[in-house]
Image: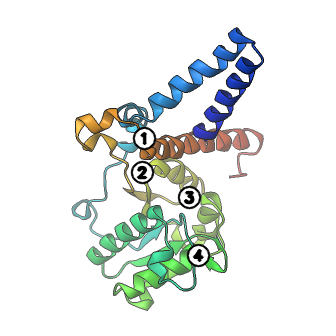
Amino acid sequence: MPLPLLFALVLIGLFLLVLKQRKSGLVFFVPSMLTLLLISLPIVTQALINSTENKYKPFNAEHHTKLNYILVLGCQIKPNKYRPANAQLGACSLARLVEGLRIARKYPYAKLIVSGYGYGGATSSALMKKTALSLGLHNTRVLTNPKAKDTSQEAKLLAYKLVDAKVALVTSAAHMSRSIDLFNQQGIDVIPAPTDFYALNQQPLWLQFIPSPEAFLAVTAHQHELIGSLWIKLLRLYDPESI
């Protein structure tokens, strides 16, 4: 999480300056503030995330004659029993579900699997299922995977069903590379269906030079995936079958 990390370094720098340790304080303060400024600019953040964001193209039904399953990975939820299911899904969950439903319309015999754990008496999988049903998908086409707490568990719990099947994997563009790696490790050959693109460079050029909270969100998401991928490699060095 670069934002709190950089703020912590800025505060350390300010504290040292207050203590009149000018040189040490500036060493912490100036680079941290410059980095904060740079990664808040959409044009800089998009350049940092481009390689991941554009690695996989959106799913094209013309390139795939058959699908058995459309797997939508869980994401953020906002449980509130007084709101409809769709209003309890976070932005990334909604983006993933909409893409899953788009693909499902093109493959009427494919099953939609909605996955993900939760809290507050709700799960990502249950909320996505309710939303899918409310939007017209038939109950017999929707399967849930509510026990998976992360992507590695999603892959392990679904391996028995998805091995040797034609599977479209729907998740955020930033999350796709790590997801494919984890599913491939379980013997599941998936077809990437990325969504939830940040596309910060699609806004007017002048806006790309104005600090934006969305730029912070984008760089945080991509750093999360980078660290997650490194963690997987470390675990596999210790035990190749661990994850």
- In the rendered image of this protein, does residue 166 appear above or below residue 34? below
Secondary structure beneath label 1 = helix
First along the sequence among labels 4 and 3: 4
Q: From mark 3 to mark 2, how far is it between C-alphas?
A: 22 Å
Is label 1 or label 3 in front? 1
Query: Would you call the spot at circle 3 few (<14 residues within 10 Å), some (14-19), or many (20 or more)?
Result: some
Residue holding disc 2: 173
Residue holding disc 1: 52
Residue 173's x, y, as percent? Answer: 42, 51
Q: Amino acid at mark 2?
A: Ala
- The answer to whether mark 1 and mark 2 are in CB contact below 8 A is yes
First along the sequence among labels 4 and 2: 4
Secondary structure beneath label 2 = helix
Residue 180's x, y, as percent? Answer: 50, 52
Q: Which mark is residue 79?
A: 4
Q: From mark 4 to mark 1, how far is it between C-alphas?
A: 30 Å
